[in-house]
Amino acid sequence: MLNFEYSIPTKIFFGRDKINVLGQQLKKYGTKVLLVYGGGSIKRNGIYDKVSSILNENHISYFELSGVEPNPRIETVRKGAELCRQNSIDIVLAIGGGSSIDCAKVVAAAAYYDGEPWDIVTDPGKIAKVLPIASILTLSATGSEMDTFAVITNMNTNEKLGTGHPDMAPKFSILDPTYTYSVPANQTAAGTADIMSHIFEAYFEKTKEAYLQNRMAEALLKTCIKYGKIAIEEPENYEARANLMWASSLAINGLLSYGKGSKWSVHPMEHELSAFYDITHGVGLAILTPHWMKYVLDETTLVNFVEYGINVWNIDENQDKYQIANMAIEKTKEYFISLGIPSKLSEVGIEEVKLEKMAEQATRFGKVGNFKPLDKQDVLSIFKAAF
Amino acid sequence: MLNFEYSIPTKIFFGRDKINVLGQQLKKYGTKVLLVYGGGSIKRNGIYDKVSSILNENHISYFELSGVEPNPRIETVRKGAELCRQNSIDIVLAIGGGSSIDCAKVVAAAAYYDGEPWDIVTDPGKIAKVLPIASILTLSATGSEMDTFAVITNMNTNEKLGTGHPDMAPKFSILDPTYTYSVPANQTAAGTADIMSHIFEAYFEKTKEAYLQNRMAEALLKTCIKYGKIAIEEPENYEARANLMWASSLAINGLLSYGKGSKWSVHPMEHELSAFYDITHGVGLAILTPHWMKYVLDETTLVNFVEYGINVWNIDENQDKYQIANMAIEKTKEYFISLGIPSKLSEVGIEEVKLEKMAEQATRFGKVGNFKPLDKQDVLSIFKAAF
């Protein structure tokens, strides 16, 4: 196990009607709130009305940054930072999924940054101070509700980059599983793939002595596999929505990666797909993952895939190890297909002619991942296999 | 899944030489420290010298409360609180296992309490303010390094009671697995049993929809089962010591019980054994656990034991369910015996004549546990079976 420093300060209010803590919690930080949200779904499902009535009752004034994109844009961050400064905002409250929360995080940091907000995305070291952030989660996927990271897109440069800072961890997040009842099947599927991908990024790594972390990762993978399907079949199944929601937070809050030397593989590749084509992040991950697995399977990674097959997919251990590994990869692919997710890049509008350019971009800072470090040709091979 | 509010604010500095953060971390809270520790082991293994040299280098003055008992006594707490007040202590630093940390926690609360310290043990509601607490862990067992609880013994009244407060969570804990290399086999065994018992208390509970939590509990149980034996056979096996140490913290920091309605069963019974006989807590737990399991196994709890047998002990699922459950219980018993722990109360000096009195005491506040609530006669039956 590698040395680590564990700090997960975000408070989670989990369960039905937990929205009722909102007023009291916000007032710890001030009385001027910037609401950050995406499209109209929170207006249709009543969450917006509920929040505004709580704010009014508690004499908390609020300003709004709405229309946050599924892959939030730097232009929107700029607008939000401006609103914070103009209105002396005390706390930034995201309502939505990872897009709104990621946007809120960078808005909160940009509010204290004098230069161009894109600078603090390309160089997180420039983040010195961050407004307090809170979130009300409406989509189980990115885990942004309990972590310190954010991903922002710059369509001018076709860049989608991650940034982060310890103070970007939300002070608190409200996780009411019923708020995800109205999430449609395709987004539930993509969200489940995103959670699973976060777990894979921590799990497929070579620190041998991180036994505890690997068993925890398997616990969360089994949770996603079981409940992803149920949530799609029965959108109002509380048990399924609750298990997925809590899995989304624990998958990426550090629990699985503390003590390991994870350097992500599939996310950096996918970010290029959605930077160039604005596709749904979880869909891109689900398409790439099995092809990445096949590509990196060799004698040095075999043990990880065998563990995965036996412990997660209950594959009979009394057979050839490569057979176990390949069966596990096949089951992963079949699972994503069973959720209704496309299985080829060509099905989501990506053009073969751009694969090379995207592979180049994915490796512009060096090799991708450390489970099996991938150069441009490796990434291109994976893109082509997934095409 | 039940509603819950998650807050685990303790920072963990985990790994080799993490003691080097001590000076910088302490200075966030002040320059006057009360060291709380037990016997001479930290003097023999060099930790005491290391700590005092760090404190001196950082111009931090320190006072000492040494001789904390394995089951820490209220008299020692009283002495510690007095030292805090007399010397205007800024932060209480425990060095040791759960006994020292529990003692430090109640000392830190008693320092701000005007009355008799035993009051804040019997009534945690009386705790209003707590000095900051930190710990350097030297024994993997109680999880006190990352939770909000403490257990204190009053030998005058033969009471061993738990207390707790959110501010009793250590601000930070330093977990260096090499600090447990010198823990002898019997204490390593008892510690492993204690960790496993914390997991059992959360795991054997009837909230059906807490799938995620149950799989996480199994992940930690497998970790303890694997590494408890290795740590005894190879005391300086870093991998084993590291996995056990991190398991001790995660077993009881809330992760496994948030979302469930756990009310503990075996701990309250064992507390009477160590209140009356001052036996090692983990040994008492290991002796009672299999007998408790046998006693509470019925058609309403069968499903939990079947899951336990299949998922933790890899028992073949294609057989009679009671057979799976009973095999799992037998394996639990055999495992504790394989660690060298006695398997009968009579072996650790407990007298049959006191069983009834202890059963009465264990149930004086009502039935024990909620997996299957136990009255005095139930507890007595378990004690007798374990005798």
Image: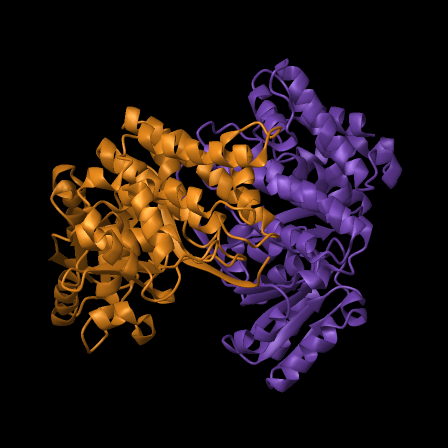
Chain colours: A orange, B purple
A338 vs B293, left or right, is left
Q: Nearer the viewer, residue A347 or B351?
A: A347
Q: Nearer the viewer, residue A126 or B55?
A: A126
- Residue B257 visible (yes or no): no
At a point 86% along the width and 31% down the height, the residue shown is B352
Q: Nearer the viewer, residue B238 or B10?
A: B238
Residue B242 x, y percent position in the rendering: 65, 55
Q: Quadrant of the N terminus of chain A?
A: bottom right
- Residue A39 visible (yes or no): yes
Residue A300 x, y percent position in the rendering: 56, 50
As drawn, B71 above or below A43: below
Q: Nearer the viewer, residue A335 or B233?
A: A335
Residue B149 x, y percent position in the rendering: 58, 52
Residue A183 x, y percent position in the rendering: 23, 35
At a point 47% along the width and 27% down the height, the residue shown is B208
The answer to which image quadrant residue A122 occupies is bottom left
**Which residue is outermost to the top?**
B320
As drawn, B111 above or below B387: below
A216 vs B39, left or right, is left
The answer to which image quadrant residue B31 occupies is bottom right
At a point 53% along the width and 67% down the height, the residue shown is B132
As drawn, A365 above or below B86: above
At a point 67% along the width and 68% down the height, the residue shown is B80
